[in-house]
Image: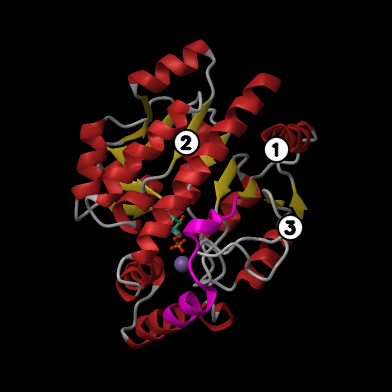
Amino acid sequence: MHNYLVFSAEVQAAREAGKPVVALESTIISHGMPYPQNVQTAKEVEQIIRDHGAVPATIAIMNGKIHIGLSDAELELLGQSRDAIKVSRRDLPYVLSTGKLGATTVAATMICAELAGIKVFVTGGIGGVHRGAETSFDISADLQELAQTSVAVVCAGAKSILDLGLTLEYLETHGVPVVSVGQEAFPAFFTRDSGFRADFRLDTAQQQAAFLNTKWALGLQGGVVIANPVPEADAMPAAEIEAITRQALDEAQQQGIGGKAVTPFLLARIKELTAGRSLVTNIALVKNNAVCGAQLALALNQTA
Ligand code: PSU
Ligand code: MN
């Protein structure tokens, strides 16, 4: 298995020194944001994690290897590439065995983080049960991964392009705890309140670390959603985002967008329809999550 893992010098040094490491995904770079903001944001997020005492490990698939930690040149390559493949659990063996360039989703990043012994992963939003899933069956593989892979996923909730009620039901069925930070509500990515409650509220990194240690000490495998709301000042108006989301969903249906292309299509359309303001919010919430994730990795490291 270790034949497949390649650690950057920075991450390797952190492992040897027992320093806390935070995983970062790469689909958000290749398919979630446009160039050059994607690369710029990736670098700034990494720096925020360093500034808070942890070491960032952005994960991607290159030349038949799982890269744990990318150089600036590798980030640039991924951010500019037009043919990086969006890699979820299903796609990992194909992209690795063919040596293609792959950007990992939440699901694939969780798998790779677990292989690398990393417990905390920071992203923007998780995938979920799509609106209309009762006919499309479109349920992100991220949810099944959360059910089985023991990594904490720090996010700003899930976008309301999804059916958030069904997403939370699905997570409950599979025993995935949803923890909110600083509030009771489950956040909806662009907005702080989805109208649904998270299962638990744990405001401090120490409380979150104790929760994770307890879950995993009991042998309860699987992930935990740590839902950290977008800062008030960066949130978008809920009514506006709902109207735009509906329009983007209608367009996706009319254009016959399906499968793994759905989420990237919706993200790009929402950005266009908000004249780029959704991207500003997206960047702000990922940075906010980086602080939360670094603090959690430190707290977990102290109790290890
Ligand atoms: N949601 C976002 N931004 C993203 C994604 C989701 O707000 O960039 C990406 C993540 O990589 C996530 C993936 O794991 O989309 C989910 O895709 P799908 O719905 O096809 O499983
Ligand atoms: Mn899907």
Task: Tell me the amino acid under the disc marked 2.
Answer: Ala
Is the CB–ligand 1 distance for label 3 below 8 Å?
A: no
Of 185 and 13, nearer the camera is 185
- Name the secondary structure under disc 3: loop
The CA span between labels 2 and 3 is 26 Å
Residue under label 3: 184
Helix, strand, or loop for circle 1?
A: loop
Q: Earlier in the sequence, mark 3 or mark 1?
A: 3
Mark 1 Cα within 10 Å, few/some/many (few <14, many 20+)?
some
Q: Is residue 161 magenta?
A: no
Residue at left 70%, top 54%? 183
Looking at the image, in which quadrant does ligand 1 appear?
A: bottom left
From where the camera sits, is residue 1 visible? Answer: no
Q: Nearer the viewer, residue 189 or 31?
A: 189
Mark sitting earlier along the chain (2/1): 2
Q: Is residue 7 left or right of residue 37?
A: right
* Residue furthest top in the image: 17
Of circles 2 and 1, the one toward us is: 1
* Residue 52 rendering spot, x and y as whole percentages: 50, 28
* Disc 1: which residue: 204
Regarding residue 277, the answer to whether it shows in the image is yes
Image quadrant occupied by the N terminus: top left
| Residue 241 belongs to the span the image colors magenta | yes
Residue 142, labelled with which disc?
none
Mark 3 closeness class: few <14, some 14–19, many ≥20 residues within 10 Å: some
The circle drawn on residue 23 is 2
